[in-house]
Amino acid sequence: AQSVAQPEDQVNVAEGNPLTVKCTYSVSGNPYLFWYVQYPNRGLQFLLKYITGDNLVKGSYGFEAEFNKSQTSFHLKKPSALVSDSALYFCAVRDYGGYQKVTFGTGTKLQVIP
Amino acid sequence: GAGVSQSPRYKVAKRGQDVALRCDPISGHVSLFWYQQALGQGPEFLTYFQNEAQLDKSGLPSDRFFAERPEGSVSTLKIQRTQQEDSAVYLCASSDRGRWEQYFGPGTRLTVT
């Protein structure tokens, strides 16, 4: 069975500071990993994905994530946080070679303080 | 182009009523997914279609839940004899052939009273 853990319910960061939102995963095979963002009263939006290749992937709005196979982690990062980044962030995993089922984490609320 | 749309956006049902939730995916997207999102939780997978074929329905919580996509485009999620525990936001997502990222609709918030 595949699973995702987001250990922090909320992350607070000052505007202009770097931010990290943590995610660890568990799959039986090779993972497909995703980050999605949910703004208030809006649907989930795709940010970035890791399928294969370079461990550092870049996505929308200046976000990036680093795939670390030994630590089974896929942390989301941004060098300089904006107030407009405040939202709910979800990490998700799909097991390569398995079905299309994607498992989401419980979400981390990011609060960027002006 | 147009994104994924869902209707209705809000639905209030009395316990025991049947409801039908509609999803219009992005035109041409082969894959369609339904999720259930409870308050404060991440989306939980319900079912997956590739074109008109329902390839995975392992997440449907009971036989009261039924989904269809007869022509490989629009999909309907039907819940029979609704219960209070069915109250949640139901999300639909679609993805293009060979692409793994999903595009989500705004969701339907179902409240069972």
Image: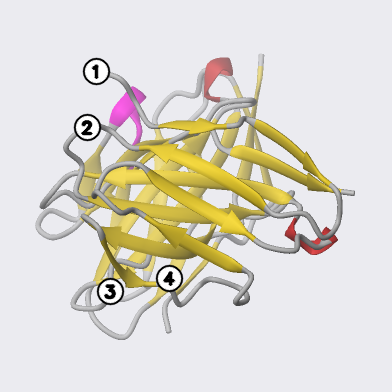
Looking at the rendered structure, whether the residues under marks 4 and 2 are on a common chain is answered as no
Q: Looking at the picture, which amino acid does disc 1 mark?
A: Gly
Looking at the rendered structure, whether the residues under marks 1 and 2 are on a common chain is answered as yes
Callout 4 environment at 10 Å: few (<14), some (14 to 19), or many (20+)?
Answer: many
Q: Looking at the picture, which amino acid does disc 3 mark?
A: Tyr
Looking at the rendered structure, whether the residues under marks 4 and 3 are on a common chain is answered as yes
Q: CA distance from mark 4 to mark 3?
A: 17 Å
Callout 3 environment at 10 Å: few (<14), some (14 to 19), or many (20+)?
Answer: few
Of the two numbered discs 4 and 1 in the rendering, the one whose residue sits closer to the viewer: 1
* A61 inside magenta stretch: yes
Residue extent of the magenta highlight: A60-64
Relative to B16, residue A114 above or below: above
Tell me the quadrant of the picture where the N terminus of chain B can be found: top left
Instruction: Give the residue pinned by disc 1.
Output: B1
In the shown orientation, is residue B78 left or right of residue A100?
A: right
**Corner quadrant of residue A15:** top right
Q: CA distance from mark 1 to mark 2?
A: 9 Å
Expressed as whole percent of the image width and height from the top left, the position of residue B105 reads 45, 34
Q: CA distance from mark 1 to mark 3?
A: 28 Å
Residue found at x 62% / y 76%: B62
Of the two numbered discs 4 and 3 in the rendering, the one whose residue sits closer to the viewer: 3
Q: Which mark is residue B27?
A: 2
Q: Which mark is residue A99?
A: 3
Q: Chain of mark 1?
A: B
* A34 inside magenta stretch: no
Expressed as whole percent of the image width and height from the top left, the position of residue B90 reads 59, 48
Expressed as whole percent of the image width and height from the top left, the position of residue A36 reads 43, 42
Q: CA distance from mark 4 to mark 2?
A: 32 Å
Q: Which mark is residue A25?
A: 4
